Amino acid sequence: TSIQTERITSAENRQPGEICAFSIAGDSTFKELSWFTPDALISLTYYEPLSEAEEKQLHPNEVRMPESSDSYIGRPWKEVCQELVKAGFRNIVTVKTNASRPLFTREDGIRSITVNGIDTFEQGTWFTPDSAIRVVHYGS
């Protein structure tokens, strides 16, 4: 009759809803034929990641990077800038480079992208909307 649940939001190699710990009356080593009183506390810990809304609450006044830095390299710079504006970024500077373009890179492809001077970031990284984004591209 006494059940206590605890949600954890970060766990390696776990699936959502997976039970991480289970005990009855503080005993997690009980056996199949163990006896407990009907009011013994059952404690259950499970993994459930943060929802998108919960993550937003942890990052007020910030926006997420739609893609990783690596995924932007070679993509059309105008398309990427539109994607960043749509995500909520407001401080985007584009710079055309005269560097030679790699063989299989689009004529208007991105050579590099930085956010606040950082050139390596993951998809979903949180930044302020006014973060300085610098897009260096080939072509027009």
Image: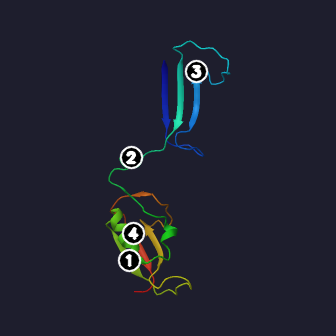
Residue 127 vertical placement versus 139 (above, below): above
Q: CA distance from mark 3 to mark 2?
A: 32 Å
Q: Which residue is mark 4?
A: 133
Q: Position of residue 106 (x, y in %)?
A: 49, 83
Q: Position of residue 14 (x, y in %)?
A: 58, 43
Secondary structure, mark 2, is helix
Measured from the top left, where is residue 36 in percent x and y? 59, 14
Q: Earlier in the sequence, mark 1 or mark 4?
A: 1
| Residue linked to disc 2 | 58
Q: Residue furthest top?
A: 37
Q: Nearer the observer, disc 3 or disc 2?
A: 3
- Of labels 1 and 2, earlier in sequence is 2
Q: N-terminal of the two: label 3 or label 1? A: 3
Contact, mark 3 vs mark 2 (Cβ under 8 Å): no
Whether residue 85 sits left or right of residue 125 in the image: it is: left
Residue pointed to by mark 3: 26
Q: Earlier in the sequence, mark 2 or mark 4?
A: 2
Residue beneath the point at 32% across and 53% down: 61
Give the label on residue 28, or none.
Answer: none
